[in-house]
Amino acid sequence: MLNIIIFGPPGCGKGTQSSLIIDKYNLNHLSTGDVFRKNIKEKSRLGELAKKYMDHGKLVPDQVTIDMLNDEINNYKDSNGFIFDGFPRTIDQAKALDSLLSEKNEKISLILSLHVSEKELLKRLLLRGKDSGRVDDQSEEVILNRINIYKKQTLVLKDYYENSGYFFQINGEGKVNHITDDIFRVIDNYIE
Ligand code: ADP
């Protein structure tokens, strides 16, 4: 299996690049944000709980998120591999992912970290707020809160993964297809 974590701050292009990667390598996309938003739409109990955090740009509690991801993974039998998009976002989530995969005799193949400046992130998210109507992209305050939480709780994962030998930093600014080319190059190198 090819198990890829796509990593980076809100607005760095994780979702956009994930859909291109899953098409080319026939993987399953696991986006925690997408699963939460689906639950909010369906007004499930998980959705109601997640909404309270998401609307303010806060992280949904670890255990809720980990249980949800576990259920999602188990929905796929005979998968070629997964793209983890928006997960893990804390050290505890990273540890949970390691043990979840090792239970299946699997491991992380690659971590692709997309680098984008803060100014560019804010610009992209405000634009997405207008285009998509995503509640958490509509207020500058909520966006800045998400970026701050990323810096405080998620960025430490770079240290967690950096020396693993499968951590790759990619420039996330510029044309979408150029970024995709850089990503495909890293994945193809890994596969060979
Ligand atoms: P973005 O990366 O642009 O913020 P996402 O769709 O990945 O968008 O996440 C939207 C929101 O969903 C987050 O701000 C957070 O509230 C919640 N969320 C998503 N993934 C996680 C996670 N792994 N742990 C906790 N909360 C999460």
Image: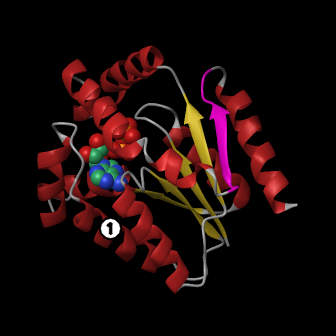
- Quadrant in which the C terminus is drawn: bottom right
Left or right: residue 86 versus residue 159 is left
Residue 4, compared with residue 127, is above or below; it is below
Q: Which residue is mark 1?
A: 66
Please give the range of residues in magenta.
165-173
Quadrant hosting residue 61: bottom left
For numbered disc 1, what is the local secondary structure? helix
Residue 1 visible in the snapshot: yes
Quadrant hosting residue 58: top left
Q: Which residue is drawn at the image coordinates 54% and 80% (left, top)?
A: 102
- Quadrant in which the N terminus is drawn: bottom right
Depth order, front residue of 170/19: 170
Q: Residues within 10 Å of mark 1 (few under 14, many from 20)?
A: many
Q: Which residue is drawn at the image coordinates 20% and 59% (left, top)?
A: 42
Give how far across and how far down residue 49 sits, in percent: 12, 57
Residue 75 visible in the snapshot: no
Depth order, front residue of 141/154: 154
